[in-house]
Amino acid sequence: MDFQIIVNTIWVLVTAKLVFFMNLGFAMVESGFARVKNTVNILSKNFIVFACASLGFLILGWGLMFGDGNGFVGLKGLFLLLGPDNSPATGEAYQGVYKAISWTSVPLWAKFFFQLVFCGTAATIVSGAVAERIKYLSFIIFSFLLSMFVYPVVGHWIWGGGWLQQKGMLDFAGSTVVHSVGGWAALAGILLLGPRFGKYTEDGKINVIPGHNLSLATLGAFVLWFGWFGFNPGSTMTADPKAISHIAVTTNTAAACAIISSTLTSWLILGKPDLGMTINGCLAGLVAITAPCAFVSVFDSIIIGFIAGVIVVFSVLIFDKLKIDDPVGALSVHLVNGIFGTLCVGIFAKDNVGNIPCGNGLIYGGGLKLFSVQLLGVVTVGIFVFIVSLIFWSIIKATVGLRVSLKEEIEGLDLGEHGNVAYPEFYIKKPSISTIKK
């Protein structure tokens, strides 16, 4: 086998494992931002959601996303990756049923595993947004539906040879395909679920419900930041030295700048530098640079990061004023900045700046052509994902139910849904010294 194919395969699998490791980061951030009584529930959802995505994407999602078909959806290679591995790694000309992803030389199963971890990321975004009041079974069902139908269709449009890709839309590592999809699906769920008990008073007052462990959330943010160096550079799916180096630096720069700007913005608006806003600022910068990371200069990644950090703070506050209860800020991080990052391609793209052809965006003389395609993608994906997700959530609500009982919500989902707690010492009444027999 060609040495370059071996190197590319190792690169793809290592970066895929970094993206898989991000599941731990999401679990830590979400559980840290949630209350102690719901910790087991959050951790359990983050465990099982990747299992759901693994099976759903294997059984049907991959074929819908990358199988040969029409502009809307893949029609071949459905059900457990039917079709031979005729990728260049086998030494044969590619004549399989997954032509849309034949541009990378690695074996079929390496392609599948890398794309799978992205599907899992989209699904896990929903977990934090609907936290502390959704039924465990309902979340599992929706995770399967998202992984098997919603995510793959959008992925086909943009990465699988579908109609948006044909029009020239660019989303290098998934600001729309991964993050906005998860965000739109989460928004539909939040609107049907309603806010947590006690979050908003009848007179419109917003009650702050702090998370139980910011240390855990901070560790999770560092895990996610680290994992993003697989998420973005790995999306080359080839070990191109110039491209992966450029993408690593734009990714890191945007995150760093967003941390600074979100901290300063929260300091000015709230009077103190809020750690939760800083954490979400980091993630917002990473989400915003995900689509344009290969297409923009390092200087422009500074601008993108700074703007993303400001956007996420205002977005969190606006969603709260609209009484859209998002316990971890997932909508502000993934949906709002996913949209922003996708549009940034149309504004800041500079042809071949990262050794990848892309054409020029608005400020580099490309006119409105690329920006208009990016905007079209944002709008159509938003409409599709929101409507389909709303239908799925509604069916689940009408059948197995969507929300736990008020009693269970007050007592905590750990006991009600799982029968155990994360910190049992908090729930055990310890005997006093006077009652202990000598």
Image (spheres, rainbow, N blue to C red):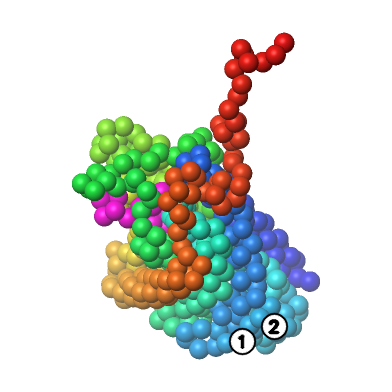
Q: Is residue 155 visible?
A: no
Residue 342 screen position, x and y as percent: 38, 65
Q: Earlier in the sequence, mark 2 or mark 1?
A: 1
In the image as oriented, which residue stretches furthest toward the right?
A: 1
**Quadrant, the N terminus:** bottom right
Residue 250 screen position, x and y as percent: 46, 53
Image position of 120 (left or right of 302): right
| Image vertical order of residue 426 relative to residue 383, above or below | above
| Whole-number angstrom distance, CA of label 2 to CA of label 1 | 8 Å
Image position of 25 (left or right of 54): left
Would you call the spot at circle 1 few (<14 residues within 10 Å), some (14-19), or many (20 or more)?
A: many
Does 323 lie within the magenta span?
A: yes
| Image vertical order of residue 133 relative to residue 92, above or below | above
Image position of 382 (left or right of 151): left
Residue 192 screen position, x and y as percent: 38, 64
Q: Are marks 2 and 1 in contact (CB under 8 Å)?
A: yes
Which residue is at the front of the view, 58 or 52?
Answer: 52
**Quadrant, the C terminus:** top right
Tell me the kind of residue under disc 1.
Lys
Image position of 57 (left or right of 375): right
Q: Give me the residue at 58% from left, 60% from top.
A: 49
Does 239 lie within the magenta span?
A: no
| Image vertical order of residue 85 relative to residue 240, above or below | below
| Image vertical order of residue 225 relative to residue 427, above or below | below
- Label disc, if present, on residue 334 of the rendered structure: none
Q: Give me the residue at 59% from left, 83% from top.
A: 67
Tell me the kind of residue under disc 2.
Leu
Q: Which residues are magenta?
A: 320-334
Q: Give me the residue at 49% from left, 36% from top.
A: 213
Q: Which residue is mark 2?
A: 82
Q: Which residue is mark 1?
A: 76
